[in-house]
């Protein structure tokens, strides 16, 4: 039985590799399934993206009311303000109607009440807006693709929305050094496409790539499925241009990998979720895109086997390992039920792993991955699976992983947690939480970036439910804190987690965060009600 | 002729690989030649290290006098202060005599006049020292291995030296996640050794590894020869514990790759050269050490061929490329003249490159590197060279690269510059500078981390000479600034470059650097006279 499974795996691997090696570099390197590609395959997906997650879910009540938010001591927008902005930007770029898409977050959990969206077309215009708002004490929320999951990119009360959508140009891509300069509002997928034209790739990849902005990615220090290979954005972002609340332009751009001239302040804007400044431009180090991409999708019987397989992947795949993802049975099954177009090559296991390799020589990579899979099966850690280097099949497998989070929010409300935990305790919390919630929850499951110790714990129920909410929070944060984990691995703090920051940050650090905020935004007009409470 | 050279290269490569594959993982992966190893091979080297660079050079005059430094408005050390510290740390760890090694910088360019060296043994002791000094307004310079090249780690006037040497423990190394926790005073080589015991490696490697401290590396955001593969410390350092000037302990430690809980303030301590806080502990992501290491040392006829070879290395070696270094003829010849024990496998070329690969499978890597070298020779870009995977030979070749900077300071004074420049203009400045200096300079040469666009420009002369100084500075900074380069790629600003910071940082950014300094060190007692003027 096991031998047959092994043959199955090897057969697929060879077929894929043959296809792969016949194709030129830039087209074979298909990475995660893009939303655009998904929309082409499956028209309903396009609708899902456009109307935001949980299309069946009702428009939420105003967050100011549901969460009893005390509006800050800001000025209220007047017609004179609107006229000023119209003069500054032109009428086409000052929106006062149909603002729902800007006011409601991706998860339909937060709804602000902004009356004004501004769409500046240059750094100078962003600076002029901020200077005016700072003088007038008008609060502002910077907004990129609005795909954040913690309510960081939507207004909470009536903040002005500052959309970066028009700052969407890739300014330069240097094929030799791999350094690209891009405006903040550029959609991640477009940036990656431009990089691929010269044989490079953006070292960041995540499900929302067809709509999220690179500036938003940087502002939230987005993680995604490639951190295991390329590290986080603090390593990849070489320079940042940010407009401060005062309207000053802080030029921390650099077109070099090494620049040790003074304090490395650009990092304050990577992951501060638009509360310290508006990122308008950045430079990024882009690695060469890989000639060969192989993906294994494997089934395992226990979390212990998952861990052993991860260690084996690190040791045996070494420098070509580019993703190491975990999906549990319930997460997979929910996606398969919701999206009938998905085809899982295997079924019936409690755990699944998606392991991707990216390398410069297909036959070498194929040999490494086959050896890794074969050894894992012989040791009884890997039960069954598929390995493929065929771009179409690679895309199909990534599609499964990408649809998992969407499956959970398609027809129900979902409490989503994004935590870092020690690997030995990585999965326990899913079982613990399932027991705590009992029949109140429809699905309690876990998936995520095992290679980075980053678990996405999800608790689904028919609709938002206070009883289940109380069973889940703050328990999940207390649990994580006891294990010295991070209560937000990659999503950030935003509005939804600001009351829980202290579970992961000590009081001295939080005190200095407040001082940094005061220093850079003395009137506290930038993205209020977020990160710090 | 060319065919013979090609054979020569290939022959060495196969011999090395055979040797390599017979040995177990942890011992074959010899990376750069350590100073300890050098000292064993060549006893004079140990002396060089112990007595600092330029052992023939005289002890310099006090910098306070030569550079006309206005002492800050700090308190003066009293017997009562010394008694306080003796009570706090114990008499053995309060030094008041034989302080020359702490007062003089590695290059013998800066000499301070400190009367007191403190050697705390815990974070709590560092905190107690800082609290006392802050209250008393006593200035303090944190010191690691004192191997910095810009005078950042020595006193300028009479600052108390706070040595981190006793905080030297590796606290934990997690084989599975690759995350290590280490105290700041741990010597880089010892840290790496400990990581290698479990199959990991520290993603930082530089010539001074046998004496520099990991805390000093982090405080200066040290670069070195592996940035091309592993990126910079902002990507690798996961957490930092820093003691502020006030004595507060800022705990920004994290044992996870992903932690998006609030502002990423740890980066303020990476590269701020001990002016914002004293790094006492840190966590770092350590990659798996590679089973196979190959090194090519090749000769080239022009800088144009160097660039073409770099592009080819990035494309063909891809994920296994771990170093890409350039040495020009004059730099190499100076080292060969000074250190007779060095053996260069090739000679007579204007440019040399050292290209290293590190991978998980020896035969794959050998095939890739041979293909790369073979193609380069066929295209006429690579003239001759050696490729080896034999650990002894790998070490011999790295020894050449490591001795280059020491060759230049062994018997003469050397103006050293560390700049980032666009690759197309990377080497021009060496020729330009040679012409400017004429016969006043004995050697004008360039070497460095080509893979990171980082050039070490060196101007040697018999002794410090004001005329040559004026020809070199500020010209070198103006030149770099015009090309929008960095005037300090990896060495930092320290004392020596603080007047030139404005060539690479804009006034708004410098203004906010000052504000950060005020916020974190209100009495300006931490490492004064450095970074900001």
Image (spheres, coloured by chain):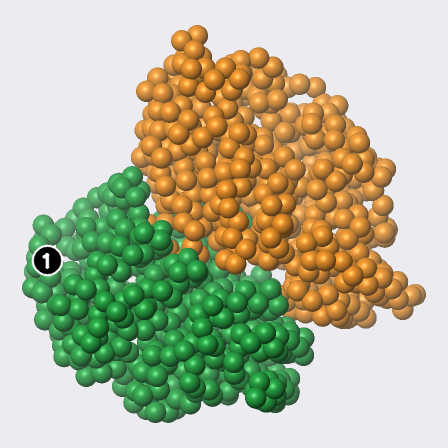
Chain colours: A orange, B green
The quadrant holding residue A456 is top right
**Image check: A100 left or right of A269?**
right
* Picture residue at 85% right of the left edge, 62% below the top: A15
Residue B221 in sight from this viewpoint: no
Q: Position of residue A320 (x, y in %)?
A: 65, 64
In the image, residue A71 sits, relative to residue B215, either above or below, namely above
Q: Quadrant of the C terminus of chain A?
A: top left
10 Å crowding of disc 1: few (<14), some (14-19), many (20+):
few
* Picture residue at 16% right of the left edge, 63% below the top: B470
* Depth order, front residue of B232/A485: B232
**Image check: A510 left or right of A403?**
left
In the image, residue B354 sits, relative to residue B65, either above or below, namely below
**In what element is the residue under mark 1?**
loop
* Depth order, front residue of A137/A121: A121
Residue B469 in sight from this viewpoint: yes
* Depth order, front residue of A261/A89: A89
Q: Position of residue A21 (x, y in %)?
A: 77, 63
* Depth order, front residue of B265/B373: B373
In the image, residue A95 sits, relative to residue B148, either above or below, namely above
Q: Quadrant of the N terminus of chain A?
A: bottom right
The quadrant holding residue A249 is top left
Q: Position of residue B239 (x, y in %)?
A: 44, 54
* Picture residue at 68% right of the left edge, 69% below the top: A316
**Image check: A278 left or right of B524?**
right
**Number of numbered callouts drawn:** 1
* Picture residue at 12% right of the left edge, 65% below the top: B63
**Circle 1 residue:** B69
Q: Position of residue A22 (x, y in %)?
A: 78, 61
Disc 1: which chain? B
């Amino acid at each position: 039985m096991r031998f047959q499974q092994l043959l199955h795996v090897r057969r697929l691997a060879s077929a894929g590799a043959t296809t792969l090696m016949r194709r030129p570099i830039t087209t074979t390197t298909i990475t995660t399934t893009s939303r655009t590609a998904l929309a082409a395959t499956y028209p309903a997906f396009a609708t899902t993206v456009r109307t935001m997650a949980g299309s069946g879910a009702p428009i939420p009540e105003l967050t100011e009311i549901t969460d009893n938010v005390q509006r800050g001591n800001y000025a209220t927008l007047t017609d004179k303000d609107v006229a000023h902005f119209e003069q500054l930007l032109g009428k086409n770029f000052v929106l006062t109607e149909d603002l729902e898409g800007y006011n409601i977050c991706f998860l339909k959990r937060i709804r602000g009440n902004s009356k004004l969206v501004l769409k500046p077309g240059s750094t100078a215009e962003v600076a002029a807006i901020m200077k005016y708002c700072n003088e007038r004490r008008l609060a502002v929320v910077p907004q990129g693709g609005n795909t954040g999951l913690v309510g960081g990119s939507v207004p909470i009360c009536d903040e002005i929305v500052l959309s970066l959508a028009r700052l969407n140009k890739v300014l330069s891509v240097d094929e030799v050094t791999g350094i690209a300069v891009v405006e903040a509002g550029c959609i991640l997928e477009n940036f990656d496409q431009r990089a691929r034209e010269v044989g490079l790739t953006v070292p960041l990849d995540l499900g929302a790539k067809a709509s999220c902005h690179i500036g938003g990615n940087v502002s939230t220090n987005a993680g995604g499925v490639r951190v295991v290979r390329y590290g986080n954005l603090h390593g990849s972002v070489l320079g940042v241009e940010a407009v401060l609340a005062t309207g000053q332009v802080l030029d921390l751009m650099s077109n070099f990998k090494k620049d040790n001239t003074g304090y490395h302040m650009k990092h304050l804007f990577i992951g501060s979720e638009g509360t310290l400044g508006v990122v308008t431009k950045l430079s990024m180090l882009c690695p060469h895109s890989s000639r060969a991409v192989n993906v294994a999708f494997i089934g395992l019987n226990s979390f212990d086997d998952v861990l052993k397989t991860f260690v084996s992947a690190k040791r045996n795949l070494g420098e070509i390992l580019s993703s190491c993802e975990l999906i549990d049975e319930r997460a997979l099954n929910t996606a398969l039920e919701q999206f009938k177009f998905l085809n899982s090559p295997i079924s019936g296991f409690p755990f699944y792993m998606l392991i991707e390799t990216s390398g410069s020589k297909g036959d070498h990579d194929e040999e490494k991955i086959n050896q890794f899979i074969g050894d894992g099966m012989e040791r009884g850690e890997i039960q069954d699976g598929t390995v493929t280097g065929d771009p179409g099949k690679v895309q199909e497998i990534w599609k499964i992983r990408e649809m998992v989070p969407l499956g959970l929010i398609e027809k129900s409300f979902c409490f989503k947690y994004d935590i870092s935990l020690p690997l030995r305790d990585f999965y326990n919390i899913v079982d613990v939480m399932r027991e705590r919630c009992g029949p109140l929850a429809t699905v309690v499951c876990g998936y995520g970036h095992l290679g980075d110790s980053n678990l996405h714990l999800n608790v689904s129920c028919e609709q938002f439910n206070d009883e289940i909410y109380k069973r889940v929070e703050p328990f999940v944060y207390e649990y994580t804190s006891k294990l010295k984990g991070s209560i937000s691995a990659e999503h950030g703090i935003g509005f939804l987690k600001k009351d829980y920051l202290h579970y992961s940050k000590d009081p001295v650090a939080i005190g200095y965060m407040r001082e940094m905020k005061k220093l850079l935004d003395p009137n506290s007009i930038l993205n209020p009600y977020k990160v710090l409470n």
